[in-house]
Image (cartoon, rainbow, N blue to C red):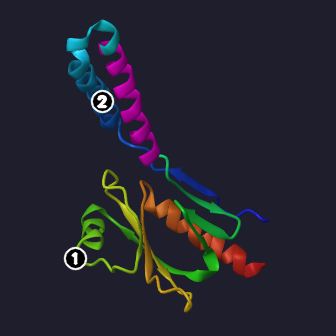
Amino acid sequence: MQLSATPYEERLTAPRSWWLVSFLVGVSFALILLPFGTLPLLGGLVGGTAAAAVVASSYGSVRIRIVGDSLIAGEAKIPVTALGETEVLDAEEARAWRTHKADTRAFLLLRAYIPTALRVEVTDPQDPTPYLYLSTRDPERLAAALVSAREAAAAS
């Protein structure tokens, strides 16, 4: 397996505020268990915080990668040769593609806490998916890496 000319990897981590919310969930559990004593209170604090942190971490652990001649976005793995033009979306345009411009057949790797995105056309005639919508903090770099990977795949 050959590596793409411009490797790309991004983890769409949850924002810092979610970790504060995780702690507050733990505090809520502690307050619920307060009438039962100190030990249940501490168990609620630790257990509630840990459970909420696991949920926040798992939601924020999705990755976008270009490996060899494939784009891996979350659970999807697409050969770069099946991808067409890319469109970098600023916050306003990304919001439009998430709402009134969205196609129900599109693949959306959506994270609402990331305002920018990249829209990539799918050119494979066998695939009913018209485009990929990928939330990303650096859409220009992802677009450049896709172009580079597509050129490397076409050259080989």
The image quadrant where one finds the C terminus is: bottom right
Residue lying at 34% horizontally and 27% vertically, measured from the top left:
48
The question of residue 40 being in magenta is answered with no
Q: Earlier in the sequence, mark 2 or mark 1?
A: 2
Q: Residue at x 63, y 70 (%)?
A: 148
57 part of magenta stretch: yes
In which quadrant of the rendered view does residue 112 lie?
bottom left
* Residue of label 2: 20
Tell me the element at label 2.
helix
Q: Position of residue 152 (x, y in %)?
A: 71, 73
Marking on residue 33: none
Which amino acid, mark 1? His
Amino acid type at circle 2 is Leu
* Secondary structure of the residue carrying numbered label 1: loop
Q: What secondary structure is the magenta-colored segment mainly?
A: helix
**From what the image shows, is residue 45 above or below residue 5?**
above
Task: Write the start and end of the magenta stretch as one range.
Answer: 41-59
| Pointer 1 local density, CA inside 10 Å: few below 14, some 14–19, many at least 20 | few
Disc 2 packing (10 Å; few <14; some 14–19; many ≥20)? few
Decide: is 126 above or below 36: below
> Which residue corresponds to the image point at 25% horizontal and 18% vertical from the top-left?
33
The picture places residue 43, in percent across and down from the top left corner, at 37, 17
154 sits left or right of 85 in the view: right
Q: Which residue is mark 1?
A: 100
- Give how far across and how far down residue 61 sits, in percent: 49, 47
55 w.r.t. 146: above or below: above
Instruction: Tell me how far mark 2 sits from mark 1, CA to CA.
Output: 32 Å
